[in-house]
Image: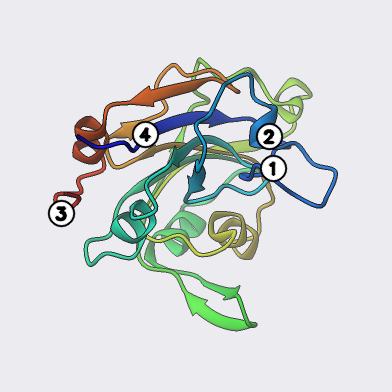
């Protein structure tokens, strides 16, 4: 029987994906939940981004999920400034050149990008309340370079105003509210992530 534990949280904005930091920032430890010793975040979100974050005591999950041969889909809801044209959609879908760590030019892999209506469960952003032109996008990736989604939309001529990760494979945020934590049983966790070689 495994002694490892698995959780998902809905990470709020203005919180780093860490329990310890030398900086004065919001930490995962500020959430009202008693996490077990040895817990750590997998597939981090930057401090401004929100949504699905995996936490586990199992150190093997990072390699199994992000460094294995089979890519794993992540889905993001992204609010950008201004209206997105069909040409920009095609540019984002087909691959766009961004700068990654070390100042290297990198062309992103083809991905799925759709214009969507603002999901009903999300309150209107300030820009929407002020009737400033904005666009909601649903972006599905199978890679995750540092700040990739933000860089992609920026290179395409739009500023990212909000970014929410809603799923990794079949592991979904669902109705989890910002700051809420849900523990997941081990077999269910790996099945939803489509990882077969975890035992």
For label 3, the crowd category at 10 Å Cα-Cα, with few meaning under 14, some 14 to 19 and many 20 or more, is: few
Residue 197 — which label? 3
- Earlier along the polypeptide chain: callout 4 or callout 3? 4
Q: Residue at 34% x, 38% y: name it.
A: 4
- Tell me if residue 14 comes above or below residue 143 in the rendering: above
Residue at mark 2 = 13
- Earlier along the polypeptide chain: callout 1 or callout 3? 1
Residue 141 spot, x, y in % from top left: 38, 54
Tell me how far mark 4 sits from mark 1, CA to CA.
27 Å
Residue at mark 4 = 5
- Earlier along the polypeptide chain: callout 3 or callout 2? 2
Q: Residue at 59% x, 59% y: name it.
A: 147
Nearer the observer, 114 or 12? 12
Residue 48 — which label? 1
Residue 114 spot, x, y in % from top left: 41, 43
Q: Residue at 66% x, 53% y: name it.
A: 158
């Amino acid at each position: 029987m495994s002694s490892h534990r698995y959780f998902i949280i809905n990470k709020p904005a203005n919180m780093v994906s860490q329990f310890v930091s030398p900086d004065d920032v919001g930490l995962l430890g500020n959430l009202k939940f008693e996490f077990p010793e040895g817990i750590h975040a997998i597939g981090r979100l930057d401090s401004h981004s929100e949504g699905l974050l995996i936490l586990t005591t199992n150190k093997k999950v990072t390699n199994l999920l992000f460094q294995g041969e089979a890519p794993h889909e992540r889905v993001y809801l992204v609010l950008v400034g201004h209206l997105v044209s069909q040409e920009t959609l095609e540019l984002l879908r087909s691959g766009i050149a961004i700068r990654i760590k070390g100042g290297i030019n990198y062309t992103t892999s083809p991905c799925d990008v759709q214009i969507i209506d603002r999901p009903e469960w999300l309150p209107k952003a300030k820009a929407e309340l002020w009737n400033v032109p904005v666009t909601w996008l649903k972006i599905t990736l199978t890679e995750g370079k540092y700040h990739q989604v933000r860089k992609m939309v920026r290179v395409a001529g739009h500023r990212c105003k909000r970014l929410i990760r809603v799923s990794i494979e079949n592991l979904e945020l669902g109705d989890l509210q910002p700051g809420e934590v849900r523990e997941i049983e081990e077999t269910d966790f790996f099945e939803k992530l489509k990882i077969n070689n975890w035992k």
